[in-house]
Image (cartoon, helix red, strand yellow):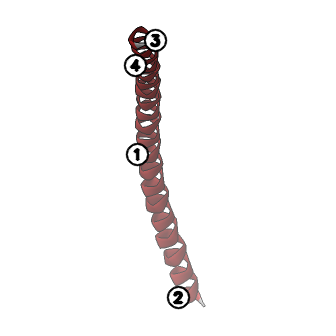
Amino acid sequence: MSLELLSQLENKIQATLENIELLKMELDEEKQKNEALVLQQQELTQKNQQLQHDLNSWSDKVNGLVGLLNNEI
């Protein structure tokens, strides 16, 4: 009876260790995905800032031209 219990315990321990290893692998994958998403977020933030700058620049130019037109009228 005790050999059977030890065998069952060994099987459960082995299954648990395998499960832990799988979870570690999944965690590593999620960490890599997170790093990629952080990089993508940084790139998009930079692009957004550049686009905001461009928009402000164009807005200033348009307002300047409208001001010139108003002065001519």
Q: Residues within 10 Å of mark 1 (few under 14, many from 20)?
A: few
- State left or right for residue 53 relative to residue 69: left
Which amino acid type is marked by label 3?
Glu
Q: Earlier in the sequence, mark 2 or mark 1?
A: 1
Query: Between tags 3 and 1, which lies in front?
Result: 3
C-alpha gap between disc 4 and disc 1: 43 Å
Query: Between tags 4 and 1, which lies in front?
Result: 4
Which amino acid type is marked by label 2?
Asn
C-alpha gap between disc 2 and disc 3: 98 Å
Q: Nearer the viewer, residue 55 or 16?
A: 16
Say which quadrant the C terminus sits in: bottom right
Contact (CB < 8 A) between labels 3 and 1? no
Q: Is residue 37 above or below residue 12?
A: below
Residue 49 in picture, x, y percent from top left: 42, 56
Q: Earlier in the sequence, mark 3 or mark 1?
A: 3
Query: Between tags 4 and 2, which lies in front?
Result: 4
Say which quadrant the N terminus sits in: top left
Q: Residues within 10 Å of mark 4 (few under 14, many from 20)?
A: few
x 40%, y 19%: residue: 13
Q: Earlier in the sequence, mark 2 or mark 3?
A: 3
Q: Which residue is mark 2?
A: 71
x 40%, y 45%: residue: 42
Q: Which residue is mark 3?
A: 4
Q: Earlier in the sequence, mark 3 or mark 4?
A: 3
Q: Is residue 31 above or below residue 60?
A: above
Q: Which residue is mark 1?
A: 42
Q: Which residue is mark 4?
A: 13
C-alpha gap between disc 4 and disc 2: 85 Å
